[in-house]
Image (cartoon, grey):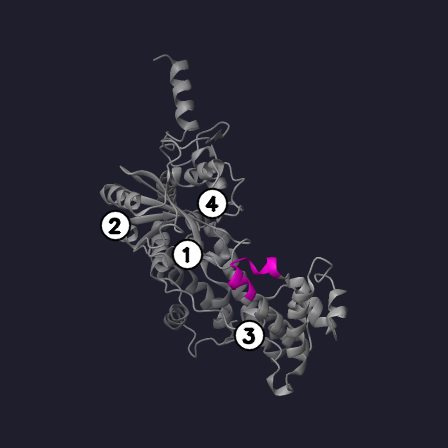
C-alpha cells in the first residue's frame, strides 16, 4: 500500500469511528475529523422481548468494558426517566434499547453487571438506569476522569475531540427523546455517543496513570457506584427560580400552593412542569397576591392563551394560600444542617471566617498545583463544615477523621489534610 493509500484508508476508518486512539492516549496532531456514521451502521431499536433477549445474550458473551448512555426528555416530560439506552461492547457491537417498550432491563443489567460500565457524567444517567433495573457494580466516568486529569472542557464532544481527534455532532442533545418513532438522525447521534466511549476510557486511563492520578480516579468511581439513591428533596418548591424575590411568608405560601398544584398537573399529563406554568408566573402571582381571576389574568405568565378553567385552578391555589392561618405559613429560609452562609461568618464568628479564608486559599493553591478543579479535590461544603466546627484537637489524625466523616475519599484526605491543619491553626 502506498503512503497515499495508507492516508486515505486511515481517514476512512476514522471518519466511521474505526481507528484507535494514539498510543499516548492523546489526539494526534492535525485537524479533528468528523465522526459521521457508526462503524457498523445504525443498529435497530430494540422494542420487543425477543430482540431484547438476543441483545442480552450478545452483551453477556462480549468482552471488555461496556459503554452505556441514556437519553432523557428533560424539559418535555415529567421526571427524568430514560427514553433510550445505548450500549456498546467488544464482540457485541452497539445496541439501542427502547425502555418504554421494554421497561424492565434488569436482565440486561445482570448480564453486564459484573463488568465495568463506561459512562460520561455517570451521576446524571445512573438514577434513570436504576429505575429500569440497570445497576453497575463498577464504573469508569469519562467526564470525571477528564476533570481529574485537568482537561479544561469535559463535555463528551470536547473530550472526544481533544483526546481522540474526532468531532461528534451534538445537535440532538436536547431533543424530545420521548418522540416515537425516533428519527434516524437522532438514532445515529445516539449510537455515536457510545461509539468511542471505551476508546476514550482507555486513553484517559493512560493519561491518569501518567499523571499519578489513576488510583484517585478509581476511588471516585467506586464511591459513585456504591452511592445509594438520593433521598427526595425536602421542600422542592423553595427552588423555584426567582424565589429570592419572595420575602413575606404569605407570599411563600402562594409559591408552595402553586408549585404543588402545578406538579400534580404535570405528573398527570406527563409533561415538564415548566410547560404547565412557568416559575416566573408562580413568583409573579406570589408577589401580587391577586384577589380574583381577572387580576391573575393580567399578570405575566397568565396571559390570553390560558383558558378560564386553568385560571380558576391557579386562582384557587392562591386563595388557599391566602386563607391559611399564620401558624401554617412556611417559615422563611430552609432548615438546613451545617454552618450558616459564609457571608455572615465575619460578624458571627471572625475566627471561623479567618480559618475559612486560609483553608480556601490553601485548597485553591493545591488544586492549581494538581491541575484539577477545587471541587474535585475536596467539596466546598466539607471545607466550610470543618472550618465552622473544627476538631477539638487540630492535628493530622483529627482532621483526617473529620474529613472521612464528611465523606471524603482516602486520596482526598491524604492530599488535603496537611493544608487544612495549617489553615485551622490560623
Position of residue 42 relative to residue 360, above or below, is: above
SS label for mark 1: helix
Position of residue 333 relative to residue 3, above or below, is: below
Q: Which residue is mark 1?
A: 128
At horizontal 68% and vertical 62% (from top left) the residue drawn is 307
Q: Which residue is mark 4?
A: 180
Q: Nearer the viewer, mark 4 or mark 3?
A: 4
Residue 425 visible to the viewer: no
Report how far apart the C-alphas of labels 3 and 1 lie in the structure: 40 Å
Callout 1 environment at 10 Å: few (<14), some (14 to 19), or many (20+)? Answer: many
Residue 130 visible to the viewer: yes
Range of magenta residues: 265-276
Q: Which dot marks residue 352?
A: 3
In the picture provided, is 345 more to the left or to the right than 396? right
Q: Earlier in the sequence, mark 4 or mark 3?
A: 4
At horizontal 37% and vertical 12% (from top left) the residue drawn is 2
Q: Position of residue 297 (x, y in %)?
A: 74, 65
Q: Nearer the viewer, mark 2 or mark 4?
A: 4
Report how far apart the C-alphas of labels 2 and 1 lie in the structure: 18 Å
Q: Earlier in the sequence, mark 4 or mark 1?
A: 1
Q: Earlier in the sequence, mark 3 or mark 1?
A: 1
The quadrant the N terminus occupies is top left
SS label for mark 3: helix
Q: Which residue is mark 2?
A: 111
Position of residue 183 relative to residue 424, above or below, is: above
Amino acid at each position: 500500500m502506498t503512503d497515499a493509500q495508507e492516508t486515505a484508508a486511515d481517514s476512512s476508518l476514522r471518519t466511521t469511528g474505526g481507528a484507535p486512539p494514539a498510543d499516548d492516549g492523546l489526539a494526534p496532531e492535525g485537524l479533528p475529523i468528523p465522526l459521521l456514521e457508526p462503524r457498523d451502521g445504525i443498529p435497530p431499536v430494540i422494542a420487543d422481548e425477543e430482540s431484547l433477549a438476543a441483545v442480552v445474550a450478545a452483551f453477556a458473551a462480549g468482552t471488555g468494558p461496556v459503554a452505556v448512555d441514556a437519553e432523557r426528555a428533560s424539559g418535555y416530560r415529567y421526571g427524568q426517566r430514560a427514553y433510550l439506552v445505548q450500549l456498546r461492547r467488544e464482540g457485541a457491537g452497539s445496541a439501542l434499547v427502547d425502555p418504554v417498550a421494554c421497561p424492565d432491563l434488569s436482565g440486561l443489567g445482570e448480564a453486564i453487571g459484573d463488568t465495568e460500565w463506561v459512562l460520561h457524567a455517570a451521576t446524571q444517567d445512573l438514577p434513570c438506569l436504576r429505575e429500569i433495573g440497570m445497576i453497575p457494580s463498577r464504573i469508569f466516568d469519562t467526564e470525571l476522569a477528564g476533570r481529574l486529569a485537568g482537561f479544561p472542557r469535559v463535555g463528551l464532544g470536547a473530550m472526544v475531540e481533544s483526546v481522540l481527534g474526532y468531532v461528534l455532532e451534538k445537535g440532538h442533545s436536547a431533543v424530545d427523546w420521548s418522540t416515537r418513532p425516533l428519527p434516524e438522525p437522532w438514532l445515529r447521534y445516539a449510537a455515536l455517543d457510545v461509539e468511542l466511549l471505551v476508546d476514550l476510557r482507555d486513553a484517559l486511563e493512560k493519561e491518569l496513570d501518567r499523571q499519578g492520578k489513576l488510583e484517585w480516579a478509581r476511588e471516585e468511581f467506586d464511591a459513585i457506584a456504591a452511592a445509594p439513591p438520593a433521598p427526595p428533596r425536602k421542600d422542592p418548591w423553595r427552588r423555584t427560580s426567582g424565589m429570592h424575590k419572595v420575602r413575606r411568608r404569605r407570599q411563600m405560601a402562594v409559591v408552595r400552593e402553586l408549585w404543588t398544584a402545578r406538579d400534580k398537573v404535570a405528573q398527570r399529563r406527563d409533561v415538564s412542569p415548566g410547560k404547565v406554568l412557568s416559575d416566573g408566573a408562580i413568583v409573579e402571582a406570589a408577589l401580587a397576591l391577586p384577589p380574583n381571576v381577572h387580576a391573575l389574568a393580567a399578570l405575566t405568565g397568565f396571559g390570553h392563551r390560558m383558558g378560564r378553567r386553568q385560571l380558576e385552578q391557579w386562582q384557587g391555589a392562591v386563595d388557599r394560600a391566602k386563607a391559611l392561618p399564620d401558624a401554617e405559613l412556611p417559615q422563611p429560609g430552609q432548615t438546613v444542617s451545617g454552618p450558616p452562609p459564609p457571608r455572615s461568618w465575619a460578624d458571627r464568628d471572625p475566627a471561623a471566617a479567618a480559618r475559612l479564608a486560609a483553608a480556601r486559599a490553601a485548597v485553591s493553591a493545591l488544586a492549581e498545583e494538581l491541575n484539577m478543579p477545587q471541587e474535585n479535590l475536596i467539596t466546598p461544603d466539607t471545607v466550610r463544615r470543618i472550618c465552622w466546627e473544627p476538631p477539638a484537637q487540630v492535628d493530622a489524625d483529627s482532621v483526617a477523621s473529620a474529613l472521612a466523616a464528611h465523606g471524603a475519599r482516602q486520596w482526598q484526605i491524604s492530599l488535603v489534610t496537611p493544608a487544612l491543619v495549617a489553615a485551622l491553626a490560623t
